[in-house]
Structure formats: C-alpha cells, structure tokens
C-alpha cells in the first residue's frame, strides 16, 4: 500500500512539474510577445518622429529620415514623394518640429506589426509664421523577421480606416 501511495505521490509531483514548465513556457511566450510589440512601437514612433521633422533648408536630411530603416521598395516610393513635396516645402519655407505622443499596435501577424503612431507637430511656414500645432497620425508596418525594417507607411487615412 505504501508503495502505491509513493507511486501516486511521485506521479502527482511529476504532473505538477509538467504544469510548472508549461506555465513558465506560456509566461515566456507572453513576455516575448509584449517585448516584441513594445519594440515595434518604438521603431514605428521613432520613424514617425523623423518623418514629421522637416526643414526646408535641409531636404536631403529630411529625405534620409523619411527613408531610414525602410525596405528598398518603400524607400523608392518615399524618395519620389519627398521629391514632389520639395516643390511645396521650399517655397513655403516649411519647418516642422515633432514631439512623439504614443504608438499602439493595431495588429501583429507572424512578426509583422502594424502600428498606429501619433506625433504632435509644430509647423511654421510663410503662411503661418507663428506656427500651427497639429497631431500627425502614421500607420507604420514593421517586420520583425526582416531586422525590424519598415515595409509600409500610411498617413491619417489608413489610421482612420483602422477604426472602421
């Protein structure tokens, strides 16, 4: 009888150890997912800040910030957009100073994070020399599997569609 009781206690102990290991594994997975989400949000918000920081006297500097850590396909699109924007930025003597507000992960699928970013921006130009305060919204796609590279960027439209 005591051999059976010892066997039973041994089995219970073994089962409890399996449960502890499973709980640890699950906790590690949750912690890793939260850490990855925070990192994606940091990458995206840092990008949004750089994209919103503009000075008509340094278009190449803004273009570098706009294309920093982006995929080759996105870099090309953004350089084309920056070239078009230059036609507006320079004549208006446009400057923008951003302050990050927050970033939140909208989705995470297989290591590809879609992050909504909000940046407070003080914009000054010839039409608003005292400046206009606004909030810029960016939807940034960050690919953890590609060394945290940014593969897509959207503006206000894409962030608003996310709510629908």
Image (cartoon, rainbow, N blue to C red):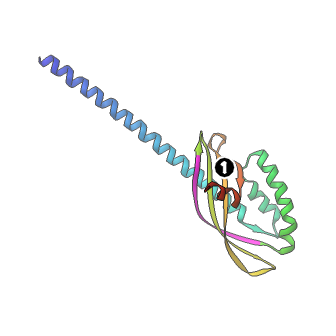
Q: Residue at x 63, y 39 (%)?
A: 145
Q: On the picture, is 161 further left or further right than 37?
A: right
Membership of 100 in magenta stretch: yes
Residue at which label 1 appears: 141
Residue 27 picture location, percent across and down: 42, 41
Percent x, y for residue 52? 71, 64
Is residue 15 magenta-colored? no
Q: Position of residue 67 (x, y in %)?
A: 76, 54
Quarter assignment of residue 9: top left
In this view, the residue farthest toward the left is 1
Q: Nearer the viewer, residue 132 or 56?
A: 132
Of residues 160 and 74, the one drawn nearer to the viewer in this rendering: 160
Q: Residue at x 73, y 53 (%)?
A: 68
Q: Main secondary structure of the magenta part?
A: strand
Q: Residue furthest bottom?
A: 130
Residue 40 placement, left or right of 58: left
* Left/right of residue 112 with respect to residue 89 in the rendered view: left
Q: Which portion, as a residue range, is magenta?
A: 95-107
What's the residue at 59%, 41% (across, down)? 109
At horizontal 46% and vertical 43% (from top left) the residue drawn is 30
């Amino acid at each position: 009888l005591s051999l059976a009781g010892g066997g039973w206690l041994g089995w219970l102990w073994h089962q409890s150890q399996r449960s502890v290991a499973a709980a640890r594994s699950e906790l590690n997975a949750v912690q890793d997912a939260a850490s990855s989400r925070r990192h994606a949000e940091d990458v995206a918000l840092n990008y949004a800040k750089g994209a919103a920081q503009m000075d008509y006297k340094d278009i190449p500097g803004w273009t570098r910030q706009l294309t920093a850590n982006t995929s080759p396909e996105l870099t090309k699109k953004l350089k084309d957009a920056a070239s078009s924007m230059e036609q507006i930025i320079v004549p208006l003597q446009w400057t923008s100073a951003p302050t990050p507000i927050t970033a939140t992960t909208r989705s995470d699928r297989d290591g590809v994070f879609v992050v909504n970013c909000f940046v407070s921006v003080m914009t000054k130009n010839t039409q608003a020399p005292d400046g206009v305060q606004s909030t810029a919204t960016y939807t940034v796609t960050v690919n953890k599997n590609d060394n945290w590279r940014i593969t897509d960027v959207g503006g206000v439209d894409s962030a608003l569609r996310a709510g629908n």
